Image (cartoon, rainbow, N blue to C red):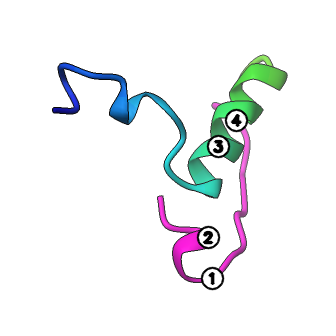
């Protein structure tokens, strides 16, 4: 289902959405250290 539809095409967690946005804003994250804070389903990647 995921490979034939767009079900998996959007962010599935706050952590995923945050890293996707950071990649759009910053030129490179290769030399960066990132801390994501949350609890339960909020921070699940």
Q: Quadrant of the N terminus?
A: top left
Q: Earlier in the sequence, mark 3 or mark 2?
A: 3
Compare residues 5 and 38 and report the one nearer the observer.
Answer: 5
Query: Element type at marker 1?
Result: loop
When the figure is inspected, residue 43 is found, relative to residue 2, above or below; the finding is below
Q: Looking at the rendered structure, which numbered label has been put on residue 31?
A: 4
Q: Nearer the viewer, mark 2 or mark 4?
A: 2
Horizontally, residue 24 falls left or right of residue 41, namely: right
Q: Residue at x 64, y 33 (%)?
A: 20
Q: Looking at the image, which residue is at 70% across and 35% down?
A: 31
Earlier-in-chain disc, 4 versus 1: 4
Whichever of labels 1 and 3 marks the residue nearer the N terminus, that label is 3
Asked if residue 14 is positioned above or below residue 30 in the image, the reply reads below
For mark 4, does the 10 Å Cα neighbourhood hold few (<14), some (14 to 19), or many (20 or more) residues?
few
Look at 36% across and 24% down and name the residue there: 6
Give the Cα separation between the discs numbered 4 and 1. 26 Å
Say left or right for 5 vs 14: left
**Mark 1 burial class by Cα count in 10 Å: few <14, some 14-19, many 20+:** few
The x and y percentages for residue 21 are 74, 32
Residue tagged by mark 2? Answer: 42
- Mark 3 element type: helix
Residue 26 visible to an observer of this rendering? no
Which residue matches tag 3?
Answer: 17
The alpha-carbon separation of the residues under discs 3 and 2 comes to: 11 Å
Disc 1 and disc 3: Cα gap in Å?
15 Å
Give the left or right position of residue 4, taking residue 5 as reference: left
Residue beneath disc 1: 39
State which tag comes first along the sequence, 2 or 4. 4
Query: Is the residue under label 4 in contact with that under label 3 (CB below 8 Å)?
Result: no
Instruction: Tell me the magenta residue range.
Output: 30-45
């Amino acid at each position: 289902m995921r490979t034939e539809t767009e079900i998996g095409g959007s962010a599935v967690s706050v952590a995923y959405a945050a890293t996707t946005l950071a990649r759009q804003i910053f030129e490179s994250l290769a030399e960066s250290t990132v801390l994501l804070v949350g609890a339960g389903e909020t921070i699940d990647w």
